[in-house]
Image (cartoon, rainbow, N blue to C red):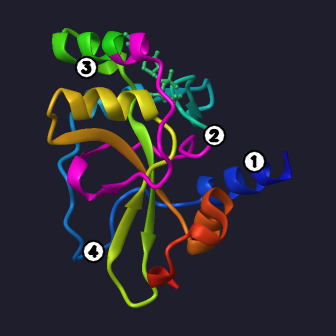
Amino acid sequence: MNFIKQFALQASGRIAAPPSGHKLWATPQRQQVIKSSTHSGNGKHMANLDNSVHSAGIEEVHNVPMSVIKRPIPSVLDEMKVQSLMATIDAETDADNVPPVDILWITGSEGGNYYFSFGGCHRFEAHKRLNRKTIKAKLVRSTLGDLYHYMGSSAPKYLA
Ligand SMILES: Nc1ncnc2c1ncn2[C@@H]1O[C@H](COP(=O)(O)OP(=O)(O)OP(=O)(O)O)[C@@H](O)[C@H]1O
């Protein structure tokens, strides 16, 4: 529980956009960005139910190339769910039906940007099988310490 709280607090203050000089991926549609939040009566943004605890404070959605995303932990998949998601994504009647996945965005100690994904297993698999070049994602500014929470000592040493 403490970990979740700690991670949520860390994530909430982070900027979503890549740093200046970094290649900025196209944001899908303004509509998509707006849908990821709702306005409360006092004008402040409130996260809606599509937001995960990690990305609740992040509104910006990027079309991230599938090729740059590292998924170090193999997915356990429900085949029916993958098929169903593929049908939804392929139909594209309403792109907002499938929310963006969260991606941990880490800058290496010697520079370079690295993108890790742990959840969103079914959405990722559906995009992969549909040969999609990109996936909608929220970039959660993260550290090597965050990666250790997911991967323990298997976290890549080249980032340290
Ligand atoms: N046909 C569909 N089947 C399943 N989910 C769908 C479908 N269409 C839209 N969605 C939405 O896609 C999202 C899927 O997220 P969900 O957490 O269920 O799976 P995932 O994150 O891709 O995989 P996992 O939770 O196993 O890592 C949900 O917000 C769900 O409402």
For label 3, the SS is helix
Between 105 and 60, the one nearer to me in the picture: 105
Label 2 vs 4, first from the N-terminus: 4
Q: Residue at x 53, y 44 (%)?
A: 55
Q: Position of residue 5 (x, y in %)?
A: 78, 49
Q: Residue tagged by mark 4?
A: 20
Q: Residue at x 24, y 18 (%)?
A: 89
Mark 4 vs mark 3, CA separation in Å: 29 Å
Between 5 and 19, the one nearer to me in the picture: 5
Residue type at mark 1?
A: Ile
Q: Residue at x 46, y 55 (%)?
A: 72
Mark 4 vs mark 1, CA separation in Å: 30 Å
Q: Is mark 4 within 8 Å of ligand 1?
A: no
Q: Residues within 10 Å of mark 2 (few under 14, many from 20)?
A: some
Q: Position of residue 49 (x, y in %)?
A: 57, 22
Q: Is residue 28 visible?
A: yes
Label 4 vs 1, first from the N-terminus: 1
Q: Which residues are magenta?
A: 53-82
Q: Residue tagged by mark 1?
A: 4
Residue 69 badge: none
Q: Residue at x 32, y 20 (%)?
A: 96
Q: Position of residue 75 (x, y in %)?
A: 47, 37
Q: Position of residue 150 (x, y in %)?
A: 63, 56
Label 2 vs 3, first from the N-terminus: 2
Q: Residue tagged by mark 2?
A: 53
Q: Residue tagged by mark 3?
A: 95
Mark 2 vs mark 4, CA separation in Å: 26 Å
Q: Residues within 10 Å of mark 3 (few under 14, many from 20)?
A: some
Mark 2 vs mark 3, CA separation in Å: 22 Å
Q: Say which quarter of the image contains residue 144.
A: bottom right
Q: Nearer the viewer, mark 2 or mark 4?
A: 2
